[in-house]
Image: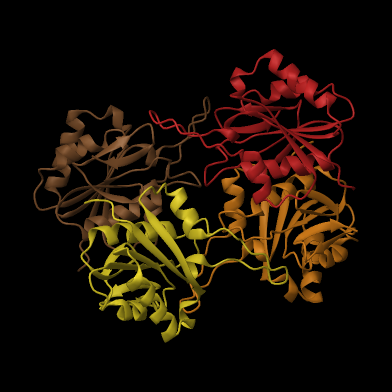
Chain colours: A orange, B red, C yellow, D brown
């Protein structure tokens, strides 16, 4: 397996959530994905496109069309999309008819800036999955590689499950 | 893709390295792999076998035979092995003739107990790779999925590269 | 200096802020102050009273009277109060007429659960200040020991300053 | 209490301990004390002098004389010394006859680079103690402010105790 360059498209979601003091409103500037990849000593070729910074409940059809167009137009055939968890499966459906690319959506249930977060593990899963899996759309959450069209978020249990 | 149970075999290495004060010698008891999987909110079925706690430079032929026998005898066909990085490729060679199992070796260049470590990302890669890749032996380090027989550790650069 | 027992009164504020996923609403149960003191290897005698869990903008006169009554009634003469930063100085004024006790208010500008937070440093300052300073009310934030009656939060700058 | 500038003298010890891979020997360049103070949002005026990087068991009489000379010659009257824990009390004795300065020694039982370390709490204690305590030599470890001449490290228990 050669080392194909990976495109990372960020759309926002809990993984990138920052803390704003009620009145003081500070903002941490450094991009969390770039930092995570550096801490994880990733030397694999990659390119990060910070496309939007939205809660996934606020994503519109136009937003999803933009994600799809960005991936379709990119030269990379291996793609990671960081995304809020609540509508991740809806975006998966939109991306499902992109042919010849391995696309993996992932996110986090706790912000990456927390000391204890699932973000680095999930991002690692996505990096491996987009290299090892067949073309199509996949979701990596809770330690599992899911077919992106056969998974749902179980909100009560706070985890993803097969359907 | 159903959710096949994963066997995690730990052999030691930098990923599990602990700090011992020169004279006081304290030891942190909690297993770092179990903690990492919990923090990463892994609900995928898995089983951890803490087989040995060795620097990989100290692993003997007998140790490698034991790792092989453990994996061969296990009911799981998807296997993650945490391992010191210096002789990870030697163990990969020994495991290469186990048929019908997807085996992924991973480790870390900085101890998992450090605030900034590649351990959670690498472990995430291994979890995804053993689910998504074909049977065989793989190594996940530095953001890449490597064929376990076509990779070496570049000690000067502190990273793994294809050969 | 003997080792006088310390009373820690928690009132809430950013230091204890937890993350709730918009729809899934998970809650981290473990108390952050107890954990911080354990990680910091504190063997000094202390007692934690979790009095309330409020944003400091929501604290009422009755709440402040309760904090005052709790400290007044306690046998300890060395007291740490964790508190939201926005109205910390108002509570300091209420506590100022408690005689014969060294009371230190502190908090955090970033939640203690973040990987990068001022919480452990600030709590350490408060522990030392309540042992080393004269009776009265003090605030420890941003690396400074402030007279609790001569300090204000500079919201624009996101820090405390002398007045 | 005005905001007197603080001199921070680093001598090494566990607090600054870095991890070196057995063969690859990487080194993390960024100074841990500066980073800790930044993460802790310290705006109090301070100056860091990285004087030496030694395990405290390797400190010689000449090293201690250099620490003393550095503090004596400095314009600051409030001083924090980060130091290995094993011979911290010996250095305290050497510094005890510096007149008119409040000097606080501190360190850590777990490296600051660990996710779970006593370093930020201890450094916070030292910052507060050197502002709030009388001139003299103090040690802040395990949540206590100790008279620097009346404390010992209990190696078996892994903590400091009064004598």
| Viewer-closest of C66 and D70 | C66
- In percent of width and height, residue B69 lies at 80, 20
Q: Where the N terminus of chain D falls, by quadrant?
A: bottom left
- Of all residues shown, which one is farthest toward the bottom? C61
Q: How many marks?
A: 0
Q: Single out the residue that lies furthest toward the top.
A: B61
Q: Position of residue D125 (x, y in %)?
A: 32, 54
Residue B132 visible in the displayed image: yes
**Splitting the image into 4 quarters, where does residue B8 fall?**
top right
* Residue D107 position in % (x across, y down): 33, 43
**Quadrant of the drawing holding the C terminus of chain D:** top left
Q: Residue at 30% of width from left, 40% of height from top?
A: D83
Q: For residue A84, which quarter of the picture?
A: bottom right
* Residue D5 can be seen in this image: no
Location of residue D135 with respect to A93 vertically, above or below: above
Residue B35: percent from the left, percent from the top? 63, 44
Q: Is residue D73 shown left or right of residue A16?
A: left
| Residue under the image location 25 percent in, 56 percent down | D129
Which residue occupies the foreground of this view, A114 or A59?
A: A114
In this rendered view, identify the residue nearer to me: C134 or B12. C134
């Amino acid at each position: 397996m050669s080392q194909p360059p990976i495109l990372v498209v960020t759309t926002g979601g809990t993984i990138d959530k920052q803390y704003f003091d009620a009145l003081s409103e500070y903002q941490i500037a450094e991009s969390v994905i770039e930092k995570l990849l550096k801490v994880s000593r990733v030397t694999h070729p990659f390119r990060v496109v910070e496309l939007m910074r939205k809660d996934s409940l606020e994503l519109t059809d136009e937003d999803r069309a933009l994600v799809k167009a960005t991936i379709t137009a990119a030269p990379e055939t291996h793609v990671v999309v960081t995304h809020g968890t609540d509508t991740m499966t809806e975006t998966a459906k939109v991306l499902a008819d992109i042919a010849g690319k391995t696309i993996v959506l992932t996110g986090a249930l706790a912000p990456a800036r927390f000391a204890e977060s699932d973000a680095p593990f999930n991002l690692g899963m996505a990096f491996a999955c987009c290299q090892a899996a067949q073309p199509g759309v996949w979701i990596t959450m809770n330690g599992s590689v899911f077919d992106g069209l056969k998974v749902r978020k179980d909100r009560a249990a706070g985890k993803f499950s097969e359907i």
